[in-house]
Image: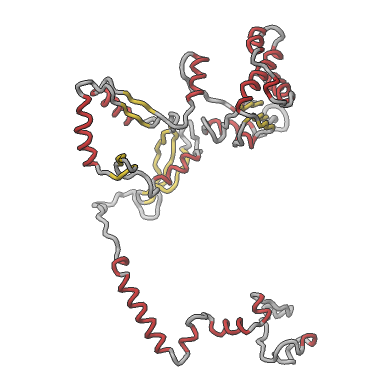
Amino acid sequence: MSHATQCPSTVGSKRPDAPAEPLLDGATGRRYWRSLDELAGTDEFHAFLHREFPSFASELTDPTRRSFLRVMGASLALAGAATIPGCRRPQHTILPYSKQPEEVIPGKPLFYATAMPLPGGGAEGLLVEIHEGRPTKIEGNPLHPINQGKSSVWAQASVLNLYDPDRLQHPMTMTDDGRADATWDEFDAFAAEHFARFDAARGAGLVFLVEKATSPSRDRLRDRILSRWPQARWLPYEPIDDENARAGARLAFGQPMGVEFDLSHARVILTLDRDFLGGEGATLPEARGFAAGRRVSATHGPGSEMSRIYAVESTMSLAGGAADHRLRLRPSQMPAYLAAVAAAVFERLSRGANGAVAQALAGRNDRGALGGIDPEWIDAVADDLVAHRG
């Protein structure tokens, strides 16, 4: 930089052949640097600017240009020869359209209404977006009574299973070393020999262990199996299930029943170690009712009061995170806490009218088993439940 264009306060601070700093804003005269190296003006940085690509760019203008091209050409030829088998397109035998369907237009999606069975029974009504026969997006069916246009996290994740490279695509057989691949021909040979041994005993000792699902097609398959082997057992099983809830419903109602909550009209909710938003039994109607109860639609009168949630749980859950009041309690303390709250509620509902129930709970209402939990968590919850009974 010449002294004529240099700031008087910096004259002599840099060597005369240093390149001028870029002026990106000519109106203000401010100088900008793209990096600290450019600001320092080191020799390494100027060499980098000169070569642009430090490894090979300047070689093209050097006397060794012909040698450089010769070496690079030989390298590329050898690399191509070594990878010719790997560069070949894989051969796939596919069946193209003999006549392209009228509704299939490349780039334009199609939507199909379907249903996805739930692990605990029932199904979700879905709308599936499809591009050239491939499902790409799932949403809730607005005409379905359960979904009403919404979808659960399980429904959203189900489309990923279609493209999971580790999904089961062929039969598997168990060996001493673990699972091994098999073919349908091997299964047919095994089935012809294995199942024939149970014909004489009408299927006694034969067990089919299946996952729980709602499927009319599978129900017809089950009926055909049991018609051939009446003594066989068909056992639906899930490793994580709500058997205790069904056992409690059997004690209360005489038969196993499912519980459905209408949280949209509940002003006070007490949840005991149950995540109704993301854990066991979480359904779209419960989530929709919870959201409706938390939505304030008026300044006074109906719709002006937001629901209040008390969560007593041993681990953090979505319901506990959304609760107004949350109490962390050990699982061993849950029965004593429930008995204490129930006794307090019956006591407040009517002095003496529910004396038999209160007396039955007296043996379980041991506040000492709560391990020093604030009694306000019993009395305040009971008062709030009684004030909003019905």
Identified at 22% across, 29% down, the residue is: 195
Image check: 86 left or right of 164? left
How far from the left and from the top, in percent, is residue 38? 65, 79
Identified at 54% across, 81% down, the residue is: 52
Picture quadrant where residue 63 is located: bottom left
- Which quadrant, please, contains the N terminus? bottom right
Identified at 40% across, 39% down, the residue is: 113
Q: Nearer the viewer, residue 114 or 252?
A: 252
Tell which residue pokes out farthest to the front in this image. Answer: 176
Q: Which of 198 and 145 is in front in this view?
A: 198
How far from the left and from the top, in percent, is residue 8? 79, 87
How far from the left and from the top, in percent, is residue 34? 64, 75
| 353 relative to 181, above or below | above
How far from the left and from the top, in percent, is residue 219? 32, 27
Tell which residue pokes out farthest to the right in this image. Answer: 9
Number of callouts: 0
Identified at 76% across, 90% down, the residue is: 12
- Which quadrant, please, contains the C terminus? top right
Image check: 132 left or right of 364? left
Can residue 385 be seen in the rendering of this structure?
yes
